[in-house]
Amino acid sequence: MRYKYFYGFLLAFSFAGYNAQVSGAVKKLAQPLNTISYAESSHIGIGGEESKIYNQFKKIAKIASNDDLYYFAMNGSNALKLYSGKELFKRKDKRFLDVYTFYSKNPLKMEYVLGCTIDRKNIAEYLKDEVYAAPQYISLRDGLLKNKKQDEIRKIQLKQIKELGYGKLTEEDVRSVKKGLEEIDQKQN
């Protein structure tokens, strides 16, 4: 039991020290999301308006390193935790499974606005949803790339898929992460 507190203190201390290393530009972009307790999909509401919260995170993701994202996934606001965790998956960062494990063991429920619906689940469940939805984006992307005739609609679709972070992720990457999730879930049960 004594070691549990020691390692908890050590982990918190290392994160506190790392925070000083997050660049000023990343901190500045993250500031508006620091107090947001929910997250939104890229488009929300009945009319499918662009989400300001999601767009703010995409600005962060463009300049943040994987270390920055990992820090936010473990220590940021709920919005930063979820968005950063998802981004680590899309970047093929192995620490995604650490984030998933942490929120599986330490559930943190939050609201997520998807289109015009609102859901409330544990962050780990949202991360798993992202992994299991990825093959649909990858399949669509690969189908669009195989089609030799690239009209404007296909170009726009490809651009949107890449903007969502699925430009380089492969089905093999997803299979590997799914296997990791299953192993983590089995250990939990």
Image (cartoon, rainbow, N blue to C red):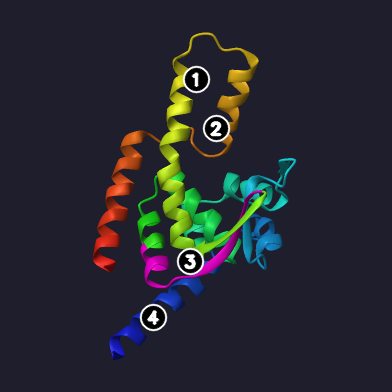
Mark 2 crowd level (few <14, some 14–19, many ≥20, 10 Å Cα):
some
Q: Could you tell me if the residues under marks 2 and 3 are in contact, i.e. CB atoms within 8 Å?
A: no
Q: Could you tell me if the residues under marks 2 and 1 are in contact, i.e. CB atoms within 8 Å?
A: yes
Determine whether the residue tagged by mark 2 lies in a helix, strand or loop. Answer: helix
Determine whether the residue tagged by mark 4 lies in a helix, strand or loop. Answer: helix
Q: Earlier in the sequence, mark 3 or mark 4?
A: 4
Cα gap from disc 1 to disc 3, whole angstroms: 36 Å
Q: Is residue 147 visible?
A: yes
Provide the residue designation for mark 4: 8
How far from the left and from the top, in percent, is residue 161? 55, 32
Residue 74's label in the rendered image is 3
Q: Nearer the viewer, residue 138 or 58?
A: 138
Name the residue rendered at 71%, 41% in the picture.
Answer: 48
Q: Nearer the viewer, residue 7 or 180?
A: 180
Q: Is residue 112 magenta?
A: yes
Q: Is residue 108 magenta?
A: yes
Q: Is residue 168 visible?
A: no
Q: Earlier in the sequence, mark 2 or mark 3?
A: 3
Q: Amino acid at mark 3?
A: Met
Q: In what quadrant of the picture does the N terminus appear?
A: bottom left
How far from the left and from the top, in percent, is residue 76? 56, 66
Q: Which residues are magenta?
A: 101-115
Residue 144's label in the rendered image is 1
How far from the left and from the top, in percent, is residue 130? 46, 48
Q: Earlier in the sequence, mark 1 or mark 4?
A: 4
Residue 161's label in the rendered image is 2
Name the residue rendered at 48%, 66% in the picture.
Answer: 74
Cα gap from disc 1 to disc 4, whole angstroms: 47 Å
Mark 4 crowd level (few <14, some 14–19, many ≥20, 10 Å Cα):
few
Name the residue rendered at 59%, 28% in the picture.
Answer: 159
Q: Amino acid at mark 1?
A: Leu
Q: Amino acid at mark 4?
A: Gly
